[in-house]
Image (cartoon, rainbow, N blue to C red):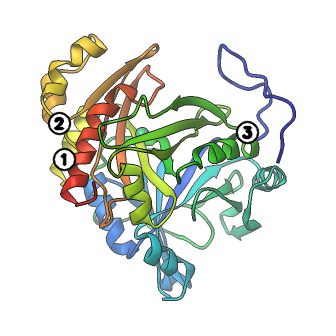
Amino acid sequence: MSHSSPHSTDPATGTRAEDFLPINGTDFIEFYVGDAVQAAYFYQSAFGFQRKAYKGLETGSRECTSILLEQGKIRFLLTSAQEPDSYVAEHVRLHGDGVRDIALWVDDAVYSFNETVARGATAVSEPEVLQDENGKIVRASIATYGDTIHTFVQRNEYSGAFMPGYVSQSNSRWAPEDTGLQYIDHCVGNVYVGEMDKYAAFYADVMGFRNLLSFDDKDISTEYSALMSKVMANGNDRIKFPINEPATGRKKSQIEEYLDFYRGQGCQHVAMATNNIIETVTELRSRGVNFLTVPSSYYDALTDRVGEIDEELTALGELGILVDRDDEGYLLQIFTKPVQTRPTMFYEIIQRKGAKSFGKGNFQALFESIEREQALRGNL
Ligand code: FE2
């Protein structure tokens, strides 16, 4: 998987001259969960996702049940096992509820699979064509960190709700209002100490991504714990995958806590974008979503740090929304507490106003908040 010639990058746009793996966007994120029916109820009622498609016993799927939810351009696929000895059951037993598949929407799944495997990717599922009366889907999967995979999905000749094998469920009797979530901004992976560079190289060499930003333990460090991170992005920047590894601190870092409880490497958080973070977070809070909070002193120092912004500081402070600025603008962000029994996966809600970065200026305040939660769990 060696690569002899460096990629030529246009410094103005950051777009590479030759992008050997064109990706249109995130196709779906699949979660393996203890019970897809109950997880779907959580994502519908708390986050405002809409039910779109289903497969299960009624459709002839004997091994597992999958429910497809949508909001904006975001698709979540929730899958749980019927068979106790199925791979889905094994995954949930080991990891708890978590992300199995960050699926990528491509124009040519066979080509994407062949090119990445030729560059060193581990094949998980060979290309297959799925067909029904609505057309065909071509899909193939490769491995990334831990038990997480990337499925390449080609859907240009498909007009159905999701994929062959699923029935449309768009006429649900009960459909809570959406909460303004629009698209997946980025998905973060946690990997073992010493493996960040290996996975950054995987995304660069095998998938043609480039290193957008890096953080080391001088950027992201508290008295107790620290992490290092490299943000990898594809040619058109629609796919952004920060990769974290723990750095040494006096006490257990939040990344180590994740790795311990997930029993391995995996997806730490999914960031979902909104056009109006105040409205979105107000709605999410009213529906019971729990967010990390920062001390009110954070807002006293905010204007000095980020300058003038459009939003009312009082509203941001009441909701606990964080702000950071870079050369191109600013961003607003907030993080949920973990959304399952184990202290593993959580969500970020983000609104970008020009900024293309990830909130480095908030890391200190945020990590102190995370550590307060870790201490309550007895894991610091
Ligand atoms: Fe993030």
Q: Residue furthest front?
A: 250
Q: Tell me the quarter of the image containing the C terminus.
A: bottom left
Give the residue drawn at x 58%, y 29%: 212
Give the residue drawn at x 59%, y 56%: 145
Image position, residue 333 (x, y; %): 32, 34
- 303 left or right of 124 in image: left
Residue 18 position by quadrant? top right
Image position, residue 228 (x, y; %): 48, 39
Q: Name the residue under label 3.
A: 208
Give the residue drawn at x 28%, y 64%: 174
Q: How far apart are marks 2 and 3 (CA)?
A: 39 Å
Give 266 or 169, whichever is nearer the viewer.
266
Q: Distance between the residues labelled 2 and 1?
A: 8 Å
User: Is there a contact, CB below 8 Å, between mark 2 and mark 1?
Assistant: yes
| 10 Å crowding of disc 3: few (<14), some (14-19), many (20+) | many
- 320 left or right of 115 in image: left
Residue type highlighted by circle 1: Arg
Give 13 or 249, whichever is nearer the viewer.
249
Nearer-N-terminus badge (2/1): 1
- 113 left or right of 239 in image: right
**Can residue 291 be seen in this snapshot?**
no
**Which label sits on residue 319?**
2
Residue type highlighted by circle 3: Gly
User: Is there a contact, CB below 8 Å, between mark 2 and mark 3?
Assistant: no
Image position, residue 304 (x, y; %): 24, 11
Nearer the observer: mark 2 or 3; the answer is: 3
Q: What element carries label 2?
A: helix
**Can residue 345 be seen in this snapshot?**
yes
Say if 8 sits above or below 71 in the image: above
Q: Mark 1 points at which residue?
A: 285
Residue type highlighted by circle 2: Leu
